[in-house]
């Protein structure tokens, strides 16, 4: 059994930031589609589509950094995440 004792903040922040950029693109596309089908607020829909991936990415990056810091603070006191792994011959 392996235990995660510490999570480096920067790689976690980067991966969560990248994942949130993708979520922002999807959310922005839905918002843009909604504004186009209604025929009103097209400029707002385009702006949201352009800005949402950036905002979502920043929020994901900051959130990842905070989560890693909290994990690193609490894991020594509570105990880290236990992983059960198995090596296969492939």
Image (cartoon, rainbow, N blue to C red):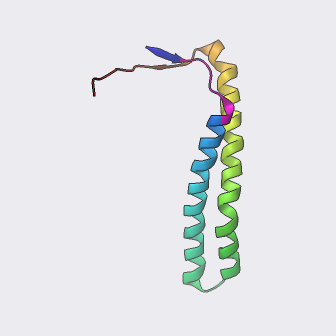
**Is residue 41 shown to the viewer in this render?**
no
Quadrant assignment, res 13 = top right
Q: Does residue 70 appear to the left or right of 15 in the view shown?
A: right
Whether 64 is drawn above or below 76: the answer is below
Residue 11 image point, x, y percent? 63, 35
The N terminus is located in which quarter?
top left
- Residue 35 visible here: yes
Asked if 10 appears above or below 51 in the picture, the reply is above
**Membership of 9 in magenta stretch:** yes
Residue 8 placement: quadrant: top right
x 64%, y 25%: residue: 71
Q: Nearer the viewer, residue 38 or 42?
A: 42
Question: Does residue 22 appear to the left or right of 67 in the view shown?
Answer: left
Q: Residue at x 70, y 36 (%)?
A: 65
The foreground one among 5 and 38 is 5
Note whether 85 is above or below 17 in the view shown.
above
Name the residue rendered at 30%, 23% in the picture: 88
Q: Which residue range is magenta in the image?
A: 4-10
């Amino acid at each position: 059994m392996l235990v995660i004792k510490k999570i480096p903040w920067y790689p976690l922040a980067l991966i969560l930031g990248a994942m949130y950029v993708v979520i922002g693109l999807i959310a922005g596309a839905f918002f843009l589609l909604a504004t186009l089908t209604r025929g009103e607020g097209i400029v707002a829909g385009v702006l949201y589509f352009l800005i949402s991936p950036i905002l979502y990415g920043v929020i994901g990056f900051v959130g990842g950094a905070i989560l890693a810091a909290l994990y690193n603070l609490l894991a020594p006191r509570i105990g880290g995440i236990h992983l059960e792994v198995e090596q296969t011959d492939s």
